[in-house]
Amino acid sequence: MIVLKKFISMLLVVAILAAFMIPVMAADSSTQVDKELQNAIKFVKSKIDIPKECTKFNYNIYNRNDQIVWSLGWTDTESQKSINVQVNEDNFISSYNSYDNLQNDSKKIPKFSKEQANKVADDFINHMDSTLPGKFKLNDTTANDYNGGYSVNYIRQENGIKFKTNFINVIVNSYTGKVTGYTCNYSKNTKFEDASKIISLNQAQKAFAEKLGLKLVYKVKTEKDKPVTYLVYVPKTTNKYIDAITGDIETSNSRMYEYGESALAEKMAVMDAAGVVSNIALTPDELDAVNGISNLITKDEADKKLRSIGNLNLDSSYKLTNSYLGKDWRNSNSLAWTLSYSKVLDESKKLTKSVQITIDARTGAFIEFWSDNMASAGAVPQKSAEQAKAICDEALKTLLPDVYAKVKYDNSNVTKDSKLENSYSFRYVRNENGLECPDNYISISYDNLLGEIRSFYTYWGKDLKFADPKNVISVEEANKVLFNKIGYGIQYIPGDSDSDDDVNMDYKLGVLNTKNAVLGYFSDSSKPCNISAVNGDILDNSGEVYKDNKIADYLDINGVKAADKVRVLTQMGIRYVEDDLKPTNSLLQKDYFILLSRLNDFYYIDRSSNDDKMIENMYSQLINQGIITKEDKAPLSVITREDAAKYFIKFKGLSDVAELKGIYKSSFKDANKINPNLVGYVCLATGFKAMNGSNGNFMPKNKMTRLDGLMTIYNFLAAK
């Protein structure tokens, strides 16, 4: 095995990345490698059935935790069936995925219940490795619409305490009962901190309130297409926790345990990482409309202004290569000039430096800056974090003096480390009325190899109003919401490592190679830690009252006719938004559209926790996509049976077929009562088994009940 490791290391010496798959095998692989591959294949086949038609085989080797991992694949190109498995040199299978195009129909009535899926998953895990069931406990089972199955999730427990870094996920097809996916992250040799001397939950809560605690801040949400602020309590810091042994504050280096920021901040952080934040280019008509506006600065004026700013160092060697006028995504009523420059660094090597800068097209105020300059080989860090921050402070003060007066440096996630870094990032948060507004901030990155600012972005809303922070609940009341409604408890997390080599990351599994795990108290990360300062409600990242994603039975389901069928649909995520079924109430158009949208996996149906917003958004999307017309929109109208047939077929995208003339003839006794324009819809709906008659009659004008609406969906799925 040592010989094999040396052989692989030689092949990977130039480009090895511990967490990414790197093909390394050649046609003349050594006999030793062939033997190891043969052993891996044999072991996998002893655990997993490989379909005989999957005759095309491929493999890769990569390194994880200083172990060789084989990625094995079997494919049948004709049927598009495939099997993929990852197994290491110790015969530990970390992932398995099966794809069968012929079985990829996610919307069917399940033949297997959640309980049966759990049993299938338990048996599969035990078959993979009989030592695992004693280490992992079932956490939850959810319906997975994407692959037509159940997602059965397990979390490792040691000493009765969760270690979320180690997990197992099993995908069970709800129609066939077969396992189609398996992922296992298991740190076999992790040393766990002794749990016999932990402080109590009450002590931990007291320590949190005194040493970490919550802070009152302004956040920003959108109302009627305009940004507005609201007051909310959030944790003071996002990377610290209470040590479960000492009660002291500790810092976690794993982002898995940090509290989430607002949706806007998360979105912008992604853009920061990509190095690009783009404004929305104007259409030709929009350009014509704004060209006559006299208070806009011209492109030449913008260029002249930028070249005059000393911090940017735009001398004559920089050529203006591109410019455009666009809408500033931060402020809907603002326009911005974005100018791109290029400078030749080495013509023989075709090396250039590009710079992109955005300024307000009316005021000339600086908005953002980005450079793609790269350090030369052998460059070393030059400045400490304090020195780099001083440079960024001065740049902010010079470029945005008015903003500089209203921001506070955000050091909540800064760790004390004297080591010089290749780059630094600094965040300056807006302050109003003595409170932070974390959705409004300046982000500056400093390249410590080049010795210059690499990017400078502003996330700053104009014309925002900040209410006086009075008549809010106390921080003590907010703490009670955190402890009692959000949840606060103990768990193991990866401990600090002596070196970066002790912690590996995998693109699929996350944190790997955890040598030690320590105990800490954390809030429940499954819920947002945003507490309304007005009434104590838990808010989501859009500022609306939080609703969890758990699908629950209707509160009034017991004793309802066809209750079992309704429960099946509920498990599939096809349900009304209300907690009560109200089975005999009339079916309203908006409610039937919700069912049909969920049946057809329309992504927009669950985007907002506010029901009114969600419904309005649903109608807008349905009209934009041509599924219904503006004339069809009547949210509170009662659905008749012929209406139900019409909309069922419209949502299936078959309106053109249903409206073909002269080819449909209904066999129902009361066919003459069906609207002539809807006969095709009725025939197709009955053909799909979604709607059936009674005693040979369709009863087209009869009003539908809410239970009837669900049964059209169930009948359709049951007939597939």
Image: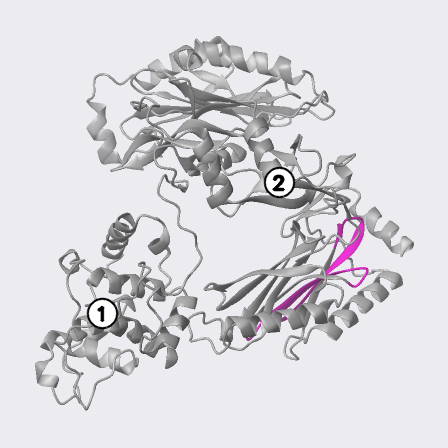
Principal secondary structure, stretch drawn in magenta: strand
Tell me the quadrant of the picture where the C terminus can be found.
bottom left
Vertical placement of residue 510 versus 249, above or below: below
Please state which of the two labelled residues, at mark 2 or mark 1, is closer to the viewer: 2
Give, as a three-letter code, the residue at label 1.
Ser
- Residue topped by disc 1: 655
Residue at the image position 41 percent from the left and 62 percent from the top: 552
Label 2 with label 1: CB-CB less than 8 Å: no
Where's the N terminus, which quadrant?
bottom right
At x 50% / y 74%, what residue is drawn?
113
The image quadrant of residue 392 is: top right
Please give the label number shown on residue 160. none
**Is residue 529 visible in the rendered structure shown here?**
no
Magenta stretch in the rendered image: 62-91
Residue 350 or 315: which is nearer the viewer? Answer: 315
Three-letter residue code for mark 2: Tyr
Q: In this view, does 587 lie to the left or right of 79?
A: left
Please identify the residue farthest to the left as the structure is shown: 672
Secondary structure beneath disc 1? helix
Image location (x, y in percent) of residue 434? 41, 17
Please name whichever residue, 2 or 376, is drawn nearer the observer in this view of the structure: 2
Residue 554: image x %, image y %?
Answer: 35, 65
Asked whether, in this view, residue 488 is left or right of residue 617, the answer is right
Let me know if residue 644 is in the magenta part: no
Mark number displayed over residue 521:
2
Q: In which quarter of the image is residue 81?
A: bottom right
